[in-house]
Image (cartoon, rainbow, N blue to C red):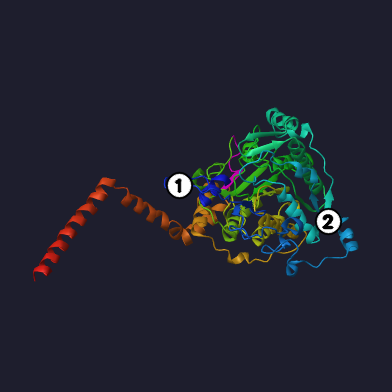
Amino acid sequence: MTLEDMYNARYNFDEDDDDSDWEPSEKQIEVLRWFCVNCTMINVEDVGNCEVCGEHRESGILRHGFFASPYLPEEDVNQDELPVTEDSEDSCKQSSLSSSTAIGFDERMLLHTEVVLKSHPHPERPDRLRTIAASLATAGIFPGKCHPIPAREITREELQMIHSEENIEAVDNTKRMHASYFTPDTYANEYSACAARLAAGLCADLASAIYSGCVKNGFALVRPPGHHAGVKQAMGFCLHNNAAIAASAAQAAGAKKVLIVDWDVHHGNGTQEIFERSKSVLYISLHRHEGGRFYPGTGAADEVGSMGAEGYCVNIPWSRGGVSDNDYIFAFEQVVLPIALDFNPDFTIISAGFDAARGDPLGCCDVTPAGYASMTQMLSALSGGKLLVILEGGYNLRSISSSATAVIKVLLGESPVIDIDKAVPSKAGLRSVLDVLKIQMNFWPTLEANFTKLHSKWGSYAFQDTREQSKKRRRTGLPMWWRLGRKRLLYRILSKQLRAKSSCNFSC
């Protein structure tokens, strides 16, 4: 469903009720509405807090990030969650070290916004970056503990390593238009081409700086996102593929093998298309799929790569929403890390969409900031710590800012507060992991032991519902006339018996 569909389904604003017996009054009442700054959902005028996420109408989240109270007006800040900041002198010393964490950000990316007024705000909006930046500033992380990377626009030659002239020209042409659309949900304005080139340039420079050892690791606080952008097309809010451009820059700097782990709730169809024939880039994606019914519909477990690169595309498709920390960590332990260790990358990139986070209006999953921090820590052990995290999706401001902050804290050396040893997956999550293991162990023999162990321990449990649903389908697969006929016959028999019994009682 689109956001507009979600609004209409929840509030029925566009449904025409039967008003044949309604007489209009002389003065009709206009229902005023406002949109939640946190989740963009619609609310009626007399409600002070969002009915969906609980955020106060005058929340200070854009000023203080997730440290602002969700239930009170802007001036109120959650003092208990505020960190103890270091002296500015110590922070400057740390940021000047080659072992520091770098952050790529430029305010010109905020100018990329939807110009055409719609019935609701577009989910991919400038406030996403504003809230993360406000959270980092309030926490004393950036500016403070992290090293800034100067922004530059990516060159045409660098873009040509990933994209076709069709994509490059299409994006470049938008700078001459006040408003335009690549797809119904992928907008552009006169500043979008610059924002996309800045995002790509920051990702390329971060990758080069990290691989060369100038900085330890980095976080690209960029937009528009990129993982849906393929060789030719811009789609899914994405114009240029930032992760693919970063991988290309790392390879230009000397990396032989690059790992991209994409935990955005949507499959990165663009990144998969770009590298599906490459054995030098391993792409692993964890995403909602639901048999192809979840956007963009790609990313089934049997999509493994092609043209001699089979096994270098690993898809872990979830069969439903509500997927939690335990499912992700379990998939990391059983699939992601074993394959990554075998691949032994020189450089690691995370396509970090936070739309699988708890509270996201599009992802509808249940991953917490601690869950994202744990996955980041596990990937930090690869590539000698050469890790670049690139922002992708995420549309609940409180969720995206708290999750991004938790990830950056891990990059700075903090340990996440979560017990990964007790990560027991859901039944659906276990089933998805077993399906992936069964396919990928043909290309990564190290997975065979995991599949055998899990199948012998939990196989019957995992597929119990499948068998029961199959039986139910067989039961409900009878023709409607047959099922109704049996019920009608039973009703007639019982009715005759009741009438006979009632007649007998009356005569007695």
Q: Closer to the camera, 243 or 494?
A: 494
Residue 419 location, quadrant: bottom right
Amino acid under disc 2: Pro
Extreme residue toward the right, this view: 89
Q: How many marks?
A: 2
Is 308 included in the stretch rendered in magenta? yes
Is any part of residue 214 visible from this angle? no
Mark number, residue 375: none
Task: Report the residue at 60% width, 54% height from top.
Answer: 43
In the rendered image, the quadrant that contains the C terminus is: bottom left
Extreme residue toward the left, this view: 507
Q: Helix, strand or loop at disc 1?
A: loop
Q: Position of residue 216 (x, y in %)?
A: 80, 53
Residue 215 horizontal side relative to residue 355, left or right: right
Amino acid under disc 1: Asp
Q: Position of residue 27 (x, y in %)?
A: 56, 49
Crowding at dot 2, Cα within 10 Å, few <14 / some 14-19 / many 20+, comes out as: some
Extreme residue toward the bottom, this view: 508
Residue carrying label 1: 17
- The span shown in magenta is 307-315
Q: Closer to the camera, 385 or 59?
A: 59
Q: Main secondary structure of the magenta part?
A: loop
User: Which of labels 2 and 1 is toward the front?
Assistant: 1
Residue 206, above or below 76: above
Work out whether mark 2 precedes mark 1 in sequence or the reverse, and give the earlier one. Answer: 1
Q: Position of residue 173 (x, y in %)?
A: 73, 29
Q: Closer to the camera, 11 or 344?
A: 11
Residue carrying label 2: 143
